Image (spheres, rainbow, N blue to C red):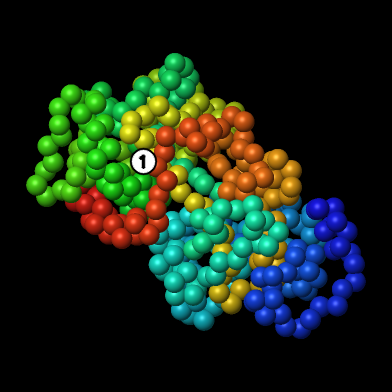
Amino acid sequence: MWKMMKAAAFAVACVPAVAGAQDLDAMTPEELLPLAQAEGKVTVFSLSSRIARVEKAFEEAYPGIDLIGVDLSSAKQIARIVAEQDAGINAVDVLFLADTPVAVRELLAPGRMHTYVPPRVAAQLEEQFKTPLLAHRLSTKVLMYNEAEYPNGSPVTNLWQLTMPEWTGKVMMVDPTQRGELLDLLVEVALRPDEMAAAYKAQFGTDIVIDSDLNGAGEQFIRALFANDLILVPNSDVLNKAVGDKTATGTPVAFGTYSDRRDNEEEGWALQVANNVEPANGILFPVVLAVADKAPSPAAARLVIDFMFGDDSDTGGPGFEPFNVPGDYATRSTIKDDPDSVPLEDLKAWTIRPNVIAENRARIADLIITLQ
């Protein structure tokens, strides 16, 4: 399919002066192409540095369209879009982000961005991945450990072990007040009081006692985790090096990103997911794509989103392959997960419910502030 589209790039086409958003949403890639070439460029805000690989592949498939990838965290994307649009600036076309509870409330609901589902792949996506936002893949914040130091498997098999003396000062996390996905992880823990209570009893043999100012075993775990000298770091690079260094001993464990394991060989890491953990090892959350309101290149924006869902091969081809790594899970049913991934159905992670997370975020954020 990409060859056909590439050949079409050199064809002479009649480009209409104006195309409505509704018309663009229904167009095939072949129909979008001449419009996108007339626009000439497309800007993508991306939570992943892997956008650089997408940029190269996209420009090879579609000569004449300059893809400008800007590496920004989800929180920074949201803040920047709000600030720029409030100032009357519309400079970005595509948003590639997570932090969906905030994105839905602050960007989608007020019309600062719009959901676009490429017609080419719509039938290959479950409804839950098409609304309210288009989910490109499922990513993770899960417990990670050093498999070089622990070759027989994770040293942690129950989340409550992280609150015990042997793990004092040896559990890490990117600061949840700065990274929404980590806050979502803690909110999800708080929303699982029965499971966290059962895990407590399995670990300690007694029923948990909840502090009078807390709501359930999940919040009690959060308090106990911080009290056990939880180490908060500014970014995942610091975390991955500390946990994954294959030459180190006495390594910590951390709530990190499973797909960062893709860099093990290049970086000299030994990151591995701790999957056999009660009651769960963390969360699965959607990474979404959306078109910014008043995008300066609306046709190219849609072409990029279509491209990033990949071709019809098992790996998704150059548009999706940067994300087809252990720990990332495609939402498009025709793409097979990396064979080194724990199968999605076997991954012991909770799948977040963005609307429920959004309703409880402020409460848990306030709790965290009192614990830091």
Percent from the top left, x then y, of residue 309? 66, 53
The reply, left or right, for residue 210 in relation to residue 26 is: left
**On the image, which quarter does residue 62 sit in?**
bottom right
Q: Nearer the viewer, residue 3 or 208?
A: 208
Percent from the top left, x then y, of residue 273? 46, 30
**On the image, which quarter does residue 290 sit in?**
bottom right
Q: Residues within 10 Å of mark 1 (few under 14, many from 20)?
A: many
Percent from the top left, x then y, of residue 176? 34, 49
Q: Secondary structure at mark 1?
A: strand
For the view shown, which residue lies furthest in the top direction? 152
The reply, left or right, for residue 136 in relation to residue 11 is: left
| 235 w.r.t. 165: above or below | below
**On the image, which quarter does residue 75 sit in?**
bottom left
Q: Nearer the viewer, residue 27 or 281?
A: 27
Q: Answer whether residue 261 is visible to the viewer in this image.
A: no
| 21 w.r.t. 136: above or below | below
The reply, left or right, for residue 312 in relation to residue 336 is: right
Q: Answer whether residue 189 is visible to the viewer in this image.
A: yes
Which residue corresponds to the image point at 71% horizontal and 59% vertical from the top-left? 120
Which residue corresponds to the image point at 52% horizontal and 81% vertical from the top-left? 88
Q: Amino acid at mark 1?
A: Met
Which residue corresponds to the image point at 51% horizontal and 62% vertical from the top-left? 131
Percent from the top left, x then y, of residue 3? 85, 53
For the view shown, which residue lies furthest in the bottom direction? 17
Which residue corresponds to the image point at 80% horizontal and 53% vertical from the top-left? 2
For the view shown, which residue lies furthest in the left direction? 212
User: To which residue does mark 1 refer?
Assistant: 173
